[in-house]
């Protein structure tokens, strides 16, 4: 006979064992449900360590159904210009949506995916279309006839291969006076004998290679009080007469100050007071610094030795090599070519004629200068033609050493006329595309010359400033090659994605490759 206390202990132990057995069975059933149910539903069995989540558009199978980004919007590049649509072009089925790279789950920025010429890398054209997808239409690409007007109506051809001279006026109370000052400075029809740019024979004979414009609004200068010439400028000038290639800006301010000009850049001219006593001459003189970049031919002490081509030779031997073939010949005004001491502010440099507009108040260039201007003008046809490709390359570096410059931006540009090739600059930027080399000379210092024209017959009190340019933008003509921002390579005809290199060379024979697209 078993004692009662042992019976009770045996029963309790048996109950515990049976309870553990039941718990084990239930656990097995749960595990079976977890593992078997997905298989029955057609889904793969995942290891216990994998956590399936809600599907999101990220190029992954988040919910473990062997489908990727099912139901996600697709943004595709249907026009194959390298930019994907900014509007959904469909819904992803979950299979192969992003395989070839033409579509993405990320919203694109092409505002017209049916036209390969419209995308964020396109050049804005004057066509009432937002070509570059920035939300603006024709910005800085049109010559608005309401604000950018012909100085001589009926003579300009906006899309022609010409030089564009744009006049802006500041501090005038009478706009008609500003227009008169600009028109008289050019004297297109030679109504004012003995004065104006067209008094110079080489310009008179090539007037069909120029467009003369004026901004039909009196602008606000950068400073209310003009004490230095470059304060005769306005940020508003960039808003008008856009889309013009080979543009030279002439700023007229109706106050008294010493005029100045950047070589190859803008000019700043007083139109009242003693400094504004002969506006047509001052403009015509300064324009020779702007466009053909002629040097001054007068002498003034303490300005240093500044010879240079084409008109100020550093010695007699160089002068003979530069213009010896013209010795004894006369220019438009009869002055004979020879070797005259004194040029570019010092004795010891040589000029070709006894006098010229670069030396005193006369309207004569001299034969050597005429030849140089004629050569520059020879690159312009004056006629409408096919658009010209170019690239604007922006670089930053130490102005004292051009080889330190690095490229920060490359943008394609299309002009109605070829970009003028610069000459006699210390550095050259070369683009090597296959067997083609496209180049443009440039400077890392801008040179500003300020002069006193108040005496009535001579020029004096000249001041030269070399202004360092840690950031420079060089416009390089590329003929039939066009830069594609999408591929960051060049397209030449039907050949696309052509690699290139950029090299900087100086006039001492040194060169350095600063960028390769490979």
Image (cartoon, grey):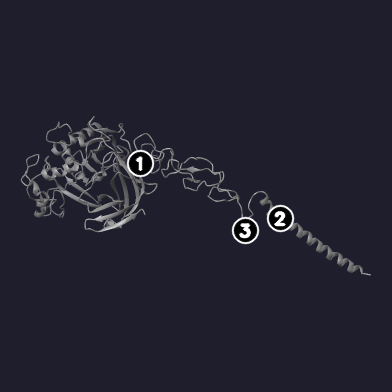
Nearer-N-terminus badge (2/3): 2
Q: CA distance from mark 2 to mark 1?
A: 65 Å
Q: Name the residue furthest front.
A: 494
Q: CA distance from mark 1 to mark 3?
A: 53 Å
Nearer-N-terminus badge (2/1): 2
**Tag 2 residue:** 32
Nearer-N-terminus badge (1/3): 3
User: What number is the disc on residue 123?
Assistant: 1
Q: Residue at x 12, y 33 (%)?
A: 193
Q: Position of residue 32 (x, y in %)?
A: 71, 55
Callout 3: SS: loop
Q: CA distance from mark 2 to mark 3?
A: 17 Å
Residue placed most toward the observer, 221 or 434: 434
Q: Name the residue furthest left.
A: 328
Q: Name the residue furthest right.
A: 1
Callout 2: SS: helix
């Amino acid at each position: 006979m078993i004692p009662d206390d042992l019976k009770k202990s045996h029963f309790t132990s048996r109950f515990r064992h049976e309870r553990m057995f039941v718990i084990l069975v239930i656990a097995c059933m749960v595990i079976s449900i977890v593992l078997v149910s997905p298989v029955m539903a057609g889904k793969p069995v995942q290891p216990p360590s994998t956590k399936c989540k809600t599907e999101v558009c990220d190029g992954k199978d988040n919910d473990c159904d062997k489908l990727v980004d099912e139901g996600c919007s697709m943004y595709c590049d249907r026009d194959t210009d390298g930019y994907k649509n900014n509007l959904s072009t469909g819904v992803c089925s979950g299979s192969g949506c992003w395989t070839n790279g033409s579509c993405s789950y990320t919203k694109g920025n092409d505002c017209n995916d049916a036209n390969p010429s419209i995308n964020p890398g396109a050049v804005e054209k004057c066509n009432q279309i937002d070509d570059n997808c920035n939300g603006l239409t024709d910005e800085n690409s049109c010559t608005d006839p309401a604000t950018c007007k012909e100085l001589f109506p009926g003579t300009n051809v906006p899309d022609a291969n010409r030089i564009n001279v744009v006049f802006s006026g500041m501090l005038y109370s009478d706009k008609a006076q500003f227009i008169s000052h600009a028109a008289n400075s050019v004297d297109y029809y030679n109504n004012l004998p003995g004065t104006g740019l067209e008094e110079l024979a080489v310009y008179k004979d090539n007037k069909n290679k120029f467009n003369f414009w004026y901004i039909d609004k009196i602008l606000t200068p950068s400073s209310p009080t003009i004490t230095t010439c470059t304060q005769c400028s306005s940020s508003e000038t960039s808003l008008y007469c856009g889309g013009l290639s080979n543009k030279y800006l002439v700023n007229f301010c109706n106050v008294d100050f010493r005029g100045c000009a950047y070589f190859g850049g803008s000019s700043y001219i007083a139109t009242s007071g003693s400094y504004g006593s002969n506006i047509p001459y001052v403009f015509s003189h300064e324009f020779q610094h702007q466009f053909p970049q002629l040097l001054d031919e007068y002498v003034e002490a303490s300005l240093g030795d500044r010879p240079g081509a084409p008109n100020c030779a550093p010695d007699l031997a160089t002068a003979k090599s530069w213009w010896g073939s013209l010795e004894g010949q006369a220019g438009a005004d009869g002055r004979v070519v020879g070797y005259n001491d004194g040029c570019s502010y010092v004795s010891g440099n040589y000029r070709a004629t006894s006098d010229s507009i670069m030396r005193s108040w006369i309207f004569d260039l001299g034969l050597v200068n005429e030849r140089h201007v004629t050569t520059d003008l020879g690159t312009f046809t004056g006629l409408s033609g096919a658009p010209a490709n170019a690239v604007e390359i922006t670089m930053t570096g130490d102005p004292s050493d051009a080889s330190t410059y690095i490229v920060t931006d490359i943008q394609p540009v299309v002009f109605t006329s070829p970009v003028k090739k610069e000459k006699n600059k210390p550095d050259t930027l070369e683009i090597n595309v296959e067997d083609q080399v496209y180049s443009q000379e440039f400077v890392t210092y801008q040179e500003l010359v300020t002069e006193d024209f108040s005496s009535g017959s001579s020029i004096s009190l000249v001041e030269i400033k070399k202004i360092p340019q840690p950031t420079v933008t060089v416009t390089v003509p590329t003929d039939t090659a066009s830069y594609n921002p999408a591929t960051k390579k060049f397209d030449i005809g039907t050949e696309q994605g052509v690699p290139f290199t950029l090299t900087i060379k100086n006039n001492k024979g040194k060169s350095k490759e600063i960028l390769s697209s490979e």
